[in-house]
Image: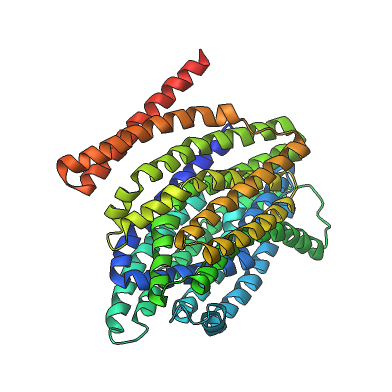
Amino acid sequence: MEKKNNFLIHGGILAIAGILVRIIGMLYRIPVVNIIGSEGNGIYGVAYNVYNIMLVLSSYGLPMAVSKLVSQRFAKGEYKSAKRVFNYSITIGIITGGLAAAFLYFGADFIENVVYSGNTPGLAIPLRILSPTIFFVAILGVVRGFFQGQGTMIPTAVSQIIEQIVNAVVSVLAGYLLMNAYKTSVNRSAYGAAGSTLGTALGALSALLFMLFLYAIYRPRFKKMVKKDKHTDNQPASNIYKIIICTMIPIILGQTFYQISAVFDDILFSNLSRTVIDSITIDLGTYSSCYILLISIPQGVASAMSASMLPAMVSSFTEGDITKAKEKLNKTIKTNMFIAIPSFIGLVVLGQGIIRMLFSKYNSLEGATMLKIGAVSVVFYTLSTVSSSALQAIDKMKVPVYHSAISLLIHIILDYILLRFTGLGIYGLVVGNTLFPLVIAVLNFKTLYMEIGYKLPLVKAFAKPVISAVIMGFFVSFTYTHGLDLVGSNFVAVVLSLMVAAITYFGPYYLLKKKTRL
């Protein structure tokens, strides 16, 4: 029998894996940045944004769509239908992933010279290296979604760690080798960026092989479940393909708008910035490493908990238990806020020290300013991600798409105004990036209230983490400032501050939690 909070346990496992993956990603970016330089990292950041949008368009919706559809069928004991969903999803992944990979490979020059107006020289090189990754990830997503739909996040968690370890090792090694091999090339930085993208490709391939191995082990058991299934499945294949695609498309479109916002950021900044090309690339490198990379670590928790919540909410909604579905959403939000709010405060007060420690080649003051302006997006992104998954769980698949489209339009207009008519420069992108998930979250929760009467538990979800995080922030700021003066070592000051952060956050949080129970 499923435990009451089983989805939280599995979500926690996936969240821990996600944080570990992002920490590995952050750590290996340190030698990569030092090897390929600021310009190479800027090219890598732009290439990765293009890759992400192609990935989203081709296969992003597959894991969540398969998870949702498999969960519905497992809740009813319809294992034959679940098997068909899985098989047909693999076919869709092969087709969409293959087409997107081919487009990225053969269209790389067009993207560099036309879309980016030649302002990112050598961009086509890492794009071509990234292209097969889309195919690998498309199939990988289907297999992950199949296991997630059964309520287990462990296969996905382990595969993510394997993927990132391979990615880290290959990225550093390939970046180093290619930078040395093309010392005299005008595109040396681009080849260095290509080395880093090779790590992404081989990491995805390793994760895919691991998941296929797990499925091969699980297949005999699943075949027995299918054989015992007494339900009749007479649906034509065309109907199942239609159901999968119609479930995928809203998920894809919703995430596409988020990824498009990053691509528009790069394009607008490249074309509207008042600085020279080299400075544009360096600024984008700072933005992608010192800001985007750091805030993505706590954001990973939201993605993990949402992936775990989706099949759990789908199961409750399928059974007609709306109260239970809302309880699961409440628990997910509370768990996320427990991580997101102190992460936001911590990045604001300790951002400069972390950047100085991890990315010595970058301007730590510029990166810290980005975090002071935009670290709150961690909270907004968390709320928008969880609420979008909740709407998908209650069959309001199209709603997050509409909300993302509205937010994207506001985002683009705001970015254009800030870049064209103010002197904010790269900070204009930070402001736009912060507003984007906020608009989505507000619209999503409004719809959840209208559809199922859900009210965001502001006091229960936010009060304890906000109070505890503010106390933590004061002590962390004091510790870092005076620790740096006393020991003269940024590394020691940061480590001491992180230790103080753990004590001064968990202590007040526990006392507040205990007090509310009395």
Instruction: Compare residues 285 and 82 and report the one nearer the observer.
Output: 285
Percent position of residue 435, x then y: 57, 51
Q: Is residue 91 visible?
A: yes
Name the residue at the left extreme.
487
The quarter holding residue 162 reads: bottom left
Name the residue at the top extreme.
518
Percent position of residue 193, x then y: 39, 73
Total of numbered circles in the picture? 0
Percent position of residue 336, x then y: 52, 39
Q: Which residue is pictured at 65% across the width and 71% down the height?
A: 96
The quarter holding residue 281 reads: bottom left
Is 126 left, or right, of 178 in this rendering? right
Percent position of residue 338, x then y: 48, 35
Name the quarter where the N terminus is drawn. top right
Against 489, residue 256 (above or below) is below
Instruction: Compare residues 434 and 165 and report the one nearer the observer.
Output: 434
Q: Is residue 18 visible?
A: no
Q: Which residue is pictured at 73% across the width and 36% down the height?
A: 449
Against 490, residue 259 (above or below) is below
